[in-house]
Amino acid sequence: MSKTRYGWFWTILKLLVLAGLAWTVCFIFSNSMQTATVSSGASGRVLELLQGLLNRLGHPGLAARLTDHIVRKLAHFCEYMLEGFFLVLMTRVLAGHRRRLLPYLSWPALVGVLTALTDETIQLFFQGRGSRVTDVWIDFGGVVAGMLVGLVCLALLRALFGHRRSELE
């Protein structure tokens, strides 16, 4: 079978990964453009939801120790983890199959840290919001975690379906 037969699949995959990455970055920046009051309300609702869930699961002590600050930092970490995941997938889709690991790490890491710096800069222009270096580190930690998840997923896919590549070529 020829590679051109699967060309439409790779095109759709590229568009889906690009759309996921663009949506994630837009989501991150839109959260940063909220005033402190709006942002606090949103994180307060998530805090109540998580505390209720922990209470139902039988962890009232953990629910009592969960704070708004922890929820905010976890939200930063998780949204940047999603960005890191999409950045690795985008790098894989654009770079193709390569044995070298450096392209999968350098460009996504650079884009991730630039997104975090831009995000913290945006917050300077909205009422009640501020910028912290620790937030950039938390965001970058999320990017790295997402990159690792993406690399593991790619390795699993290669292990499961890699043997079929020689049949297709």
Image (tube, rainbow, N blue to C red):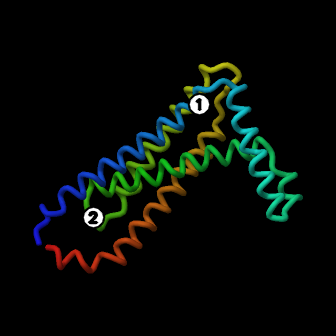
Question: Circle 1 — which element?
Answer: helix
> Looking at the figure, which quarter contains the C terminus?
bottom left
The residues tagged by marks 1 and 2 sit, at their Cα atoms, a distance apart of: 36 Å
- Along the line of sight, which residue is nearer the eye, 60 or 129? 60
The x, y position of residue 102, in whole percent, is 36, 58
- Along the line of sight, which residue is nearer the eye, 48 or 100? 48
The x, y position of residue 78, in whole percent, is 59, 50
Q: Quadrant of residue 36?
A: top right
> Label 1 is placed on what type of residue?
Ser
Please give left or right for residue 161 compared with residue 30 in the image: left
Please give left or right for residue 50 compared with residue 157 in the image: right
Position of 166 relative to 45 (above/below): below
The x, y position of residue 38, in whole percent, is 69, 27
Q: Residue at x 73, y 32 (%)?
A: 40
The x, y position of residue 155, in whole percent, is 40, 71
Residue that mark 1 sits on: 32
Say which label, 1 or 2, has the lower sequence index.
1
Question: Circle 2 — which element?
Answer: loop
Residue that mark 2 sits on: 98
